[in-house]
């Protein structure tokens, strides 16, 4: 009989082993923290994933795997759908380093990617707000054309102080007189100059920037906006990232008196007057307003996947202004709230190009809003407040012909906002039928 010698582990040995294990775990946590700093340094300067960011991510993955292999080799080797002790440990450790959690989800479902983008957009939006406040607080008012310029655009819009009277309340929107010819002929040669184009038709937020290559009149007007007519299915989608936005006399919680009600009316005009096939999504995405774009994104993707005939996506909003500011205009004897077109540039002056918020459809987005702005200026002078450019993406990347429209503000009445739908529908019809300025 062979005798096996067995070594007996003393209490001191156990204590030393536990202390050693604790030191190894602390070392791993510290190493993970340092690699996070390396990764953040690689991302924050340019907004792009550099070699340092990649190295930090890979080092973190290696440390995490080795921790599991060392402490929980048996559990880590099991492939189950249940949540194991190792997964709980991983969640606890990774919870301290959320950026790694986001980075490691690149190959997972689109919902996870949207969550990451929503978080990033939320953080950047807060940063933009901070920069905006600093920019407007600058009494000198000096800025370059590329990094924040209002020009004469805001002065051209009709801004009135609140008088307490509802000037549009008695005007029925169904009585609107549609334009049959141009009221103004724009000088396109003049607008080929970048500075003139920006001064007359754009407002560039102080936190972002643009240039003559991006806002090139000739290139943007060459983009074909005409819709296919021989389709069996919806051509236009209208939805609302911020469906809870209402007007000063809107009943809280009543969708019919919010921007959703505007969407109903716009759908009616586009369908009955112009013959477009329109799908109106009345869903609510802004129960948590700060995450509305992240919530709306996956839903928008699904709608477009289920309805491949959709060529145009319109996100209908309402602007927010100071409580003593009243946006008002008169078009063909009808008093109404003016509209403003809105584009995101995926670029901030602080972070540069936002690689995580790329928009391959940006030029077509810009072409759509510019053609809408110029046609509106020719047929309905004073109807549009212009095009506002800001730094993020705002879900405009899902469809080339995407348009974000702000209709009036919270100080307008619901009737004033409703009155803006006929001219907006007419301008849409002209642009989507292929008419050029």
Image (cartoon, rainbow, N blue to C red):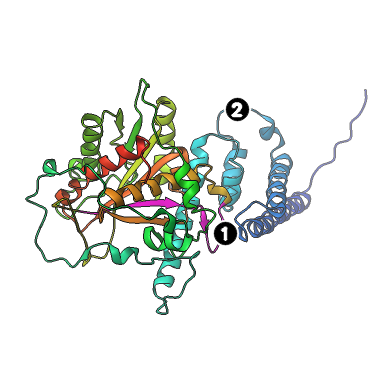
Please state the horizontal and vertical placement of residue 271, each as a whole percent of the image. 24, 30
Callout 2 crowding tier (Cα within 10 Å): few <14, some 14–19, many ≥20: few
Magenta stretch holds residue 420: no
Please state the horizontal and vertical placement of residue 92, each as a whole percent of the image. 57, 47
**Residue 80, numbered circle:** 2
Q: Which residues are magenta?
A: 337-354
> Is 409 situated above or below 426?
below
Q: Nearer the viewer, residue 60 or 47?
A: 47
Q: Quadrant of residue 30?
A: bottom right
> Is 117 situated above or below 1?
below
Q: Residue furthest bottom?
A: 140
Residue at disc 1, secondary structure = strand
Image position of 264 (left or right of 389) = left
Please state the horizontal and vertical placement of residue 167, each as a whole percent of the image. 10, 57
The structure residue drawn at horizontal position 65% and vertical position 51%, both measured from the top left corner, is: 49
The structure residue drawn at horizontal position 26% and vertical position 28%, both measured from the top left corner, is: 275
Callout 1 crowding tier (Cα within 10 Å): few <14, some 14–19, many ≥20: some
Magenta stretch holds residue 339: yes
Residue to which mark 1 is pinned? 352
Dot in front, 1 or 2:
1
């Amino acid at each position: 009989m062979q005798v096996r010698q067995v070594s007996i582990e003393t209490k001191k040995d156990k204590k030393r082993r536990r202390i050693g294990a604790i030191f190894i775990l602390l070392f791993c946590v510290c190493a993970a923290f340092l690699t996070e700093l390396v990764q953040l340094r690689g991302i924050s300067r340019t907004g792009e994933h550099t070699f340092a960011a990649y190295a930090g991510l890979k080092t973190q993955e290696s440390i995490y795997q080795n921790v599991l292999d060392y402490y929980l080799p048996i559990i880590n080797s099991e492939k189950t759908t249940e949540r194991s002790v190792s997964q709980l440990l991983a969640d606890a450790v990774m919870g301290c380093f959320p950026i790694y959690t986001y980075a490691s989800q690149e190959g997972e479902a689109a919902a996870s990617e949207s969550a990451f983008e929503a978080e990033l957009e939320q953080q950047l939006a807060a940063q933009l707000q901070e920069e905006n406040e600093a920019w407007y607080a600058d009494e000198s008012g000096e800025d370059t054309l590329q990094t924040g310029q209002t020009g004469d655009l805001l002065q051209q819009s009709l801004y009135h102080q609140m008088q307490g009277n509802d000037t549009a309340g008695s005007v029925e929107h169904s009585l609107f007189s549609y334009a049959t010819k141009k009221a103004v002929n724009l000088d396109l040669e003049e607008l080929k100059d970048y500075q003139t184009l920006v001064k007359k038709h754009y407002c560039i937020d102080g936190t972002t920037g643009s240039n003559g290559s991006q806002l090139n009149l000739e290139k943007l007007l060459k983009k074909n906006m005409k819709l296919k007519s021989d389709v069996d299915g919806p051509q236009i989608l209208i939805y609302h990232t911020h469906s809870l936005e209402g007007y000063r006399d809107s009943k809280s919680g009543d969708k019919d008196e919010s921007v959703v009600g505007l969407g109903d009316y716009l759908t009616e005009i586009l369908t009955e007057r112009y013959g477009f096939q329109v799908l109106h999504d009345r869903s609510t995405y802004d129960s948590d307003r700060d995450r509305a774009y992240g919530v709306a994104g996956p839903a928008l993707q699904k709608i477009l996947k289920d309805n491949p005939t959709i060529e145009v996506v319109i996100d209908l909003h309402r602007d927010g202004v100071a409580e003593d500011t009243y946006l008002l205009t008169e078009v063909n004897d009808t008093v109404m709230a003016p509209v403003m077109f809105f584009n995101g540039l995926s670029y901030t002056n602080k972070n540069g190009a936002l690689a995580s918020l790329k928009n391959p459809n940006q030029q077509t987005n810009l072409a759509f809003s510019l053609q809408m702005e110029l046609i509106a200026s020719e047929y309905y002078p004073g109807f549009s407040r212009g095009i506002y450019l800001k730094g993020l993406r705002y879900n405009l990347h899902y469809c080339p012909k995407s348009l974000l429209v702000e209709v009036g503000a919270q100080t307008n009445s619901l009737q004033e906002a409703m009155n803006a739908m006929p001219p907006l529908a007419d301008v849409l019809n002209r642009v989507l039928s292929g008419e050029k300025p």
